[in-house]
Image: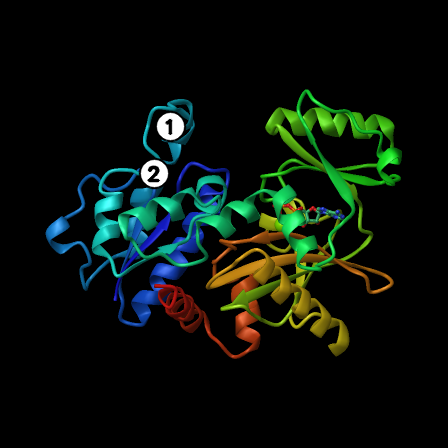
């Protein structure tokens, strides 16, 4: 199969997206697919369109080429008139049998790429534009999950310049979580223990975004459940060695212990998988996704959010869950393509 593995871009998750892309591209090549690696934003001006999906291909060389653009990200972000799609990106994607979306963050995950591709008749991995948009915004996610009877932390959403909320008026007490509605990688997530910290957290969050969520802090353990074609994979438990699952603990090797299958009873496992499957449905997901959970000491579970393009490096959470089922990484990547093609 001819596959464009789309990665990079200019979001804060550019670097991790390239790691995902390299992993996926190598895995697909190991299975005989003509996969190529492409930076969604910087594209490839020199692409040979007559032989775009060569049999011999140097994935590491392609990654090196993509990294030559790293130093141009800041000025690219500042230049707001530039198209999100780089040189030859749409052309190459139209030539592929499917585009593997190894993007993370804002424009990859908010549904805009998916909607654009739908209009261009480009096939892609993962869920469609509407579920992507719903899952990008944690306010909408929580509304949809509640509607689907999936428990979420109690809280509210505030908008910059409009409302000030006394946490006691909405039934909360400290600590509370203040987080930007459309962020990722734990950027813009604050845990406030008192009024001063709460006010400071709101100020910092509003520096990043105009929509901010205030919700109860769930004191407990953290889990994640990947789903393929609506079916939950084994649950993984995430245990940061210090603090919560913030940016540093997500991306520093060895900072977090992960246990899959999670060290919880079969009953609790089934319950979490059930909520994950219900949440997937409530958010109109297709193909695959990953939902994040907290569970308190009483076994009460809360879904924090849904990720439509979860990490795809060989050591990311979802590939680890698939491995527990005996699915190795190349098989996992091929499986995601298979369930994604079934959408069309
Ligand atoms: N209500 C909450 N209670 C306890 N911890 C939370 C809560 N919300 C977020 N967190 C912590 O912050 C991390 C990031 O929050 P999350 O909602 O998953 O946003 P992101 O999109 O940045 O991953 C979570 O993995 C968890 O460790
Ligand atoms: Mg998360």
Whether residues under marks 2 and 1 lie with C-beta atoms below 8 angstroms apart, the answer is yes
Q: Which residue is mark 2?
A: 41
Snapshot quadrant of residue 318: bottom right
Q: CA distance from mark 2 to mark 1?
A: 9 Å
State the quadrant of the N terminus.
bottom left
Is 260 left or right of 327, judged from the image as shown? right
State the mark number for residue 76: 1
Residue 298 in the image: above or below residue 80:
below
Asked if one can make out residue 265 in the rendered structure from this viewpoint, the answer is no
Percent from the top left, x then y, of residue 143? 66, 48
Which of the two residues, 108 or 314, is positioned nearer the viewer here? 108
Snapshot quadrant of residue 33: bottom left
Secondary structure category for the residue under label 1: helix
Q: Residue furthest top?
A: 161
Is 131 left or right of 84, judged from the image as shown? right
Residue 330 in the image: above or below residue 46:
below
Q: Residue at x 89, y 39 (%)?
A: 173
State the quadrant of the C terminus.
bottom left
Q: Mark 2 or mark 1, which has the lower sequence index?
A: 2
Percent from the top left, x then y, of residue 276? 64, 64
Percent from the top left, x then y, of residue 320? 55, 67
Q: Residue at x 70, y 70 (%)?
A: 262
Percent from the top left, x then y, of residue 287? 46, 64
Q: Residue at x 51, y 54 (%)?
A: 308
Asked if one can make out residue 1 in the rendered structure from this viewpoint, the answer is yes
Q: Residue furthest left?
A: 50
Is 35 left or right of 133, judged from the image as shown? left
Q: Residue at x 26, y 45 (%)?
A: 90
Which of the two residues, 315 or 183, is positioned nearer the viewer here? 183
Is 23 left or right of 52, judged from the image as shown? right
Q: Residues within 10 Å of mark 2 (few under 14, many from 20)?
A: many
């Amino acid at each position: 199969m001819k596959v464009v593995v789309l990665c990079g871009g200019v979001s804060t998750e550019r670097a991790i997206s390239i790691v995902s892309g390299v992993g996926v591209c190598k895995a697909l090549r190991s299975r005989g697919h003509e996969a190529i690696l492409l930076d969604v934003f910087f594209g490839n001006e020199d692409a040979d369109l007559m032989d775009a999906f060569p049999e011999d291909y140097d994935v590491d060389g392609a990654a090196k080429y993509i990294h030559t653009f790293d130093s141009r990200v800041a000025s690219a972000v500042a230049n707001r008139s530039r198209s999100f799609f780089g040189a030859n990106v749409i052309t190459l994607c139209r030539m592929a049998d499917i585009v593997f979306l190894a993007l993370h963050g804002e424009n990859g995950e908010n549904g805009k790429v998916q909607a654009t591709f739908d209009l261009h008749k480009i096939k892609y991995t993962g869920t469609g534009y509407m579920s992507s948009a719903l899952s990008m915004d944690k306010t909408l996610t929580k509304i949809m999950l509640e509607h689907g009877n999936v428990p979420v932390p109690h809280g509210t959403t505030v908008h910059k310049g409009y409302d000030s909320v006394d946490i006691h008026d909405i039934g909360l007490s400290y600590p509370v979580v203040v987080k930007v509605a459309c962020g990722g990688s734990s950027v813009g997530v604050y845990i406030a223990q008192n009024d001063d910290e709460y006010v400071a957290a709101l100020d910092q969050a509003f520096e990043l975004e105009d929509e901010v969520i205030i919700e109860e802090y769930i004191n407990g353990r953290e889990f994640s459940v990947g789903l393929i074609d609506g079916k939950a994979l084994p649950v993984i438990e995430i245990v940061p060695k210090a603090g919560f699952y913030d940016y540093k603990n997500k991306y520093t090797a060895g900072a977090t212990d992960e246990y899959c299958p999670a060290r919880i009873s079969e009953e609790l496992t089934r319950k979490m998988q059930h909520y994950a499957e219900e949440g997937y449905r409530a958010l109109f997901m297709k193909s695959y996704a990953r939902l994040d959970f907290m569970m308190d000491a009483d076994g009460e579970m809360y879904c924090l959010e849904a990720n439509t393009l979860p990490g795809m490096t060989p050591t990311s959470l979802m590939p680890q869950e698939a491995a527990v089922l005996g699915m190795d990484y190349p098989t996992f990547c091929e499986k995601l393509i298979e369930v994604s093609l079934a959408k069309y």
